Amino acid sequence: MAWIDNLFKIMTEQKGSDLHLTSEHVPMVRVSGDIVPIAGAPKLSREQLQQVLFEICPERNRKQWEETGDTDFAYALEGIGRFRANYFRDRYGIGAVFRRIPDKILSAEQLGLPPGVMRLCDFKKGLVLVTGPTGSGKSTTLAAMIDHINATRKEHIITIEDPIEFVHPMKQCLVNQREVHNHTKSFAAALRAALREDPDIVLVGEMRDLETTRIAIETAETGHLVFGTLHTSTAASTVDRIINQFPAEEQEQIRLMLAGSLRGVVSQTLLKKKGGGRCAALEILFVTSGIASLIREGKTFQIPSAMQTGAKYGMQLLNDALEARVKSGEVEPLEVWEKAIDKDDIAKRLKALGIDVEAMLEQRSREEKAAKAATQPELPPAGGGAGSAGAAPKPEAPKPPPGSTVLGGQGPVWKRPGT
């Protein structure tokens, strides 16, 4: 058992989404959107953390990190789950972030996805994009969509990921999952090869470069259903991002290709729920003939207006979804305001609901100032000290797992810093 496995267990018990490890710092975990330290865990020196991380790192990834300062891979812990690992180097030394991947693929109903999202799975060909900032749940939404196809159609699915996150068992479909740098050289190379592998559906984990984007559009044009992701926040900006990747002399041709092949865009962001946990707010675009004309003519700035009149097709703007979360009582108004792209519009919508955002921002500012003043250190009373009677006992530190092979057989001693 690796020393770090204990951290993964704690992270899972706390329902954390990400584990953050930085040299000379206490391990931290993201819970309901907030990064907090793991109680009782020690600071790990640069040398200690490197040994802890290398204990679970494949040799190929270790060499890649030593050469480039970055590497990605997947790590599975039986009974706990899978984790997407990213190792990096910063001014403190080695560092790592582990994203927890649920064992079970959640359905659209469990995720609370609008019906329109799953309608995008009914297409036989074309390009479907799921977009959003890092950590917005794109992989989880895509996994639900691919699992739906896997359960309802008898076709061939190829996924190209870096690394493989959700594992899709074969249901009705034949599923081949390929990992970049492990099973193939690059996204572009695997996507090009997929055309000779008789696919019906192709999932591209990330359209991160021009060549991959070009081949994805061509694959969608040749009669395949292609799913991909981008780090964009709205449907209109997604279309612009794709077109602007290409040289100016190619952009008109790409507009024509995209207008004919793009089927829909789902742009999402995660919100903190009242009482803990998170939920998604989604912007949904279906490429109707009207939307396709706007793309062809370079009038993407008119897409939001067209979406407002496209509710009957299942379209919705991000602010529509954010407003709905406030009306349902799931999310605080300020959380919605902070995540909105068009803040003036969401402020007007909230005001119509009787919520004054400006007043709430001023109130929060006063509370933060008061809290800061209350936490200023006070001088201890005469004769007092850290060991005075009545001091609260320190919590017990987590125990290291037995059998670890790093750092003298037991790994770093888990004790509170300063004890």
Image (cartoon, rainbow, N blue to C red):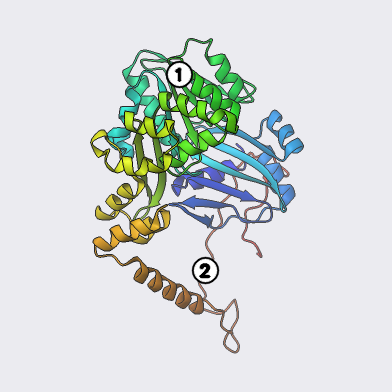
Which residue corresponds to mark 2? 393
Numbered disc 1: secondary structure: helix
- Could one spot residue 102 in this view of the protein? no
Amino acid type at circle 2 is Pro
In the foreground, 195 or 58: 195
The quadrant the N terminus occupies is top right
In the foreground, 56 or 357: 357
Image location (x, y in percent) of residue 312: 23, 36
Work out whether 227 lies above or below 4: above
Label drawn at residue 161: none
Label drawn at residue 221: 1
Q: Earlier in the sequence, mark 2 or mark 1?
A: 1
Image location (x, y in percent) of residue 157: 44, 18
Residue in the image at 29% along x and 43% along y: 308
Image location (x, y in percent) of residue 392: 50, 71
Amino acid type at circle 1 is Glu
Number of other residues with Cα within 10 Å of mark 2, as a class: few under 14, some 14 to 19, many 20 or more:
few
Number of other residues with Cα within 10 Å of mark 1, as a class: few under 14, some 14 to 19, many 20 or more:
some
Farthest bottom residue?
382
Work out whether 150 lies above or below 131: above
Image location (x, y in percent) of residue 10: 50, 47
The quadrant the C terminus occupies is bottom right
> How many marks overall?
2
Select label 2 or label 1 by which is in front: 1
